[in-house]
Image (cartoon, rainbow, N blue to C red):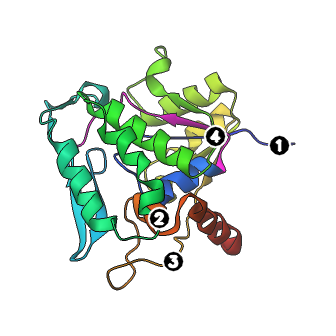
Amino acid sequence: MNRMILAAHQPQYLPWLGYFDKMDRVDIFVLLDTVQFKKNEWQNRNRIKGSSGPHWLTVPVRRHFPQRLHQVEIVDPAFRRRHRRSLQSAYGKAPYFRQEAGILDDLYGRDWTDLSSLNVESVRSLAGRFGIETPVHLGSEFQDVPDDQADDRLIALCRRLGADTYMAGAGGQAYMDLSRWQRAGIGVVFQEFRHPVYPQRNGTFVPSLSAVDLLFHCGSEGFVLVRRARKEAA
């Protein structure tokens, strides 16, 4: 009997490869756009690598604790110009930059006012470039899902979307109440991500950067390296 596997995650800004590995491994992926915002984690920033090494791209936001992610406003629209310039500087000489630079038009050609919409677009755009076809839903589509306890929220999403298994991140065992899942009759599996090593400019290979690093160095077909690493680790 085939399992129906769901995974969920906050929409991040230009996420890393582990994010897309999880999306690629499941049948349904939910972007939790109504969870509480945490400033200066991965929701409004990520890392790229230039000639001087890794550095941050940070989206300037206005936050008021305990604001939800979909309520967070972008405060300086000029970030689009700065980030595009930084990406051009970091990757302009990478082998696939010219071929894949259209993604920058998708991200920075629009006047974003809220962080969630920008992040959702960055996730969808990169997933599309990598050929990931997993259906994506927004958490805000489901108004009657409990919001006060993470396990209950995810269990409810699995039930609404017909999933019998949930894929959690590798660290999920530290904070999930697995007894709740057992009582709900929903299995839990944990992602085991093996980061691929690929040709990368500017010195020693640095893992865990934004997925744009793989895209510009190896092209959209480069995601096969993620899938290959997964099979080798199995």
Q: Residue lying farthest right?
A: 1
**Residue at (17%, 50%) from the top-left corner?**
82
Residue closer to the observer: 98 or 3: 98
**Magenta segment range?**
25-38
Indicate which disc, 4 or 3, sits on the residue closer to the N terminus. Answer: 4
Query: Looking at numbered disc 1 in the image, what kind of residue is underneath it?
Result: Asn
Horizontal placement of 206 versus 168: left or right?
left
Magenta stretch, main secondary structure, is: loop
Give yes or no for contact between labels 4 and 2 (Cβ–Cβ under 8 Å).
no
Q: What is the number of the mark on residue 125?
A: none
Indicate which disc, 4 or 1, sits on the residue closer to the N terminus. Answer: 1
Q: What is the number of the mark on residue 134?
A: 4
Badge 3 is on which residue?
197
Q: Position of residue 39 (x, y in %)?
A: 20, 44
Residue closer to the observer: 81 or 213: 81
Query: Looking at numbered disc 3 in the image, what kind of residue is underneath it?
Result: Val
